[in-house]
Image (tube, rainbow, N blue to C red):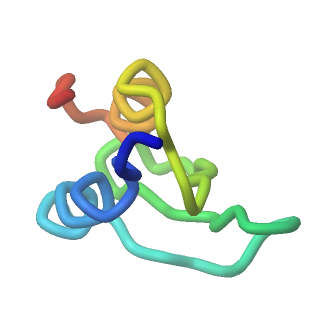
Amino acid sequence: MPASLTPPLKKLLVKAGCSFERQGKGDHEIWYSPITDRRFVVDSFIKSRHTANAVLKQAGLPKAF
């Protein structure tokens, strides 16, 4: 089973100024990006680099995975 990409993803988000807002449904979290002024969902266990890059795109950040 591949390691989760969520911990390094969260580090990138925090470094860029994004912040955790609240718990979502199930194991999802709602985060806020001051870059795009939008909220987006982060899953607690992301296995796919495509999904991780999609979250970064929603936050207004470049691909990292």
Query: Can you say whether 21 is above or below 35 in the image?
Result: below
Q: Furthest residue to the front?
A: 1
- Residue at image position (31%, 64%) is 7
Q: Furthest residue to the right?
A: 25
**Is residue 44 rendered to the left or right of residue 61?**
right
Q: Position of residue 27 (x, y in %)?
A: 74, 67
Which is more toward the observer, 26 or 18?
Answer: 26
Query: Can you say whether 63 is above or below 61 in the image?
Result: above
**Is residue 16 rendered to the left or right of residue 38?**
left
**Is residue 15 rendered to the left or right of residue 56?**
left
Q: Position of residue 38 (x, y in %)?
A: 54, 48
**Is residue 41 rendered to the left or right of residue 7?**
right
Query: Can you say whether 28 is above or below 55 in the image?
Result: below
Q: Quadrant of the C terminus?
A: top left
- Quadrant in the rendering for residue 61: top left
Q: Position of residue 36 (x, y in %)?
A: 40, 41
- Residue at image position (20%, 23%) is 63
- Quadrant in the rendering for residue 54: top left
- Residue at image position (49%, 62%) is 32
Which is more toward the observer, 8 or 31?
Answer: 8
